[in-house]
Amino acid sequence: MTAAISKTVKLGLIGDNITRSKSPRLHRTAGNLTGLEVTYDRLIPKDMGLSFDEVFELARSSGFRGINVTYPYKEIVASKVTVLDPLVRAIGAVNTVVFDADGPKGFNTDYSGFMNAYRSVRGTEPPGVVCLIGTGGVGKAVAFGLIGLGAHTIRCVDLDPAKAENLAETLAAFGSPTQVEVSGDAVAAASGADGIINCTPLGMVGIGGTPLPADAMQGAAWVFDAVYTPVDTQFLQDATRAALTVISGYELFFGQGVDAWDIFTGVDIDQAALRAAIQGDEI
């Protein structure tokens, strides 16, 4: 990764509903632990009275080393950056941007962060048949993570059939042995699945709700929720009551954050110390 050019690193997060995001805390704390002065700003387009493009340009032109990008801009930003990794190009979504002298570079740490989160809870146990609800930016990254983990089948579910079909075609073109199916009915897709994943914004602070009725979880072995604000979503509460193994969105948050830190700075971080320093913070 490219190292930061000074002791001061200016970072930020562009997204909606990010007032309670822990990303600023993670990166500022990483700076404290490594001797770097890190600033990290929340950049909410609607609150700033600007479009996403205008906020992106503002960050680029005002000395930011890089930005994280979250819902609903991960796919939009992919067209504004150079993506060197063919896997990330296939995902079609970017959540980390570095502003280099020769232009902005795009990365996706949701993909690696999800794989690390899964392994931290389930070890080498294969995912099996997985119902993936939500096929937007994070859904695409998680789907490729499932392929990397050796999932037997991915059932892509979305209210927008075209989005689900597009993801299925992208996954199929990747040439993996993982089978890919498409459904517009989350309950039907969850039936007989080993794993159930929420990659919709349902459950987020300011949105609420859950993508699946509690009784539709019966028979599954594990669940993952990409939402981490709050950590204890209705989706995960229902899964806990059904005695399923729960993989929290916090694990994805932490994993993608550490990977983003490496991309931004190239500076090694003690992950255990970082986790301990931010774990007690209210999300």
Image (cartoon, rainbow, N blue to C red):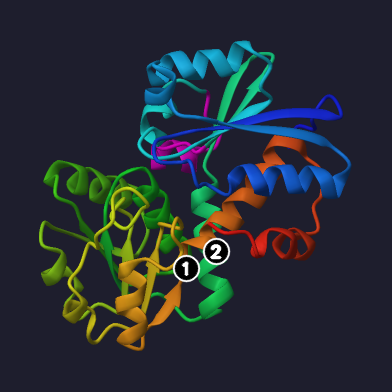
Query: Is residue 90 shown in magenta?
Result: yes
> Residue at 37% across / 17% down in the picture?
51
Give the residue pinned by disc 2. 251
In the image, residue 215 lies at what x, y percent? 17, 81
Mark 2 to mark 1 CA distance (whole Å): 6 Å
Q: Residues within 10 Å of mark 1 (few under 14, many from 20)?
A: many
The answer to whether 40 is drawn above or below residue 153 in the figure is above
Disc 2 secondary structure class: helix
In-image side of 246 versus 117 (left or right): left
In the image, residue 22 lies at what x, y percent? 58, 49
Q: Which residues are magenta?
A: 82-95
Q: How many marks?
A: 2
Please say whether residue 43 is visible from this viewpoint: yes
Q: Quadrant of residue 266?
A: top right
> Residue at 28% across / 82% down in the picture?
220
In-image side of 200 versus 161 (left or right): right
Do the residues under discs 2 and 1 have CB atoms within 8 angstroms?
A: yes
In the image, residue 174 lies at what x, y percent? 37, 49
Q: Quadrant of residue 214?
A: bottom left
Amino acid on which the number 1 mark rests in the picture: Ser
Quadrant for the N terminus in the image = top right
Q: Which mark is residue 248?
A: 1
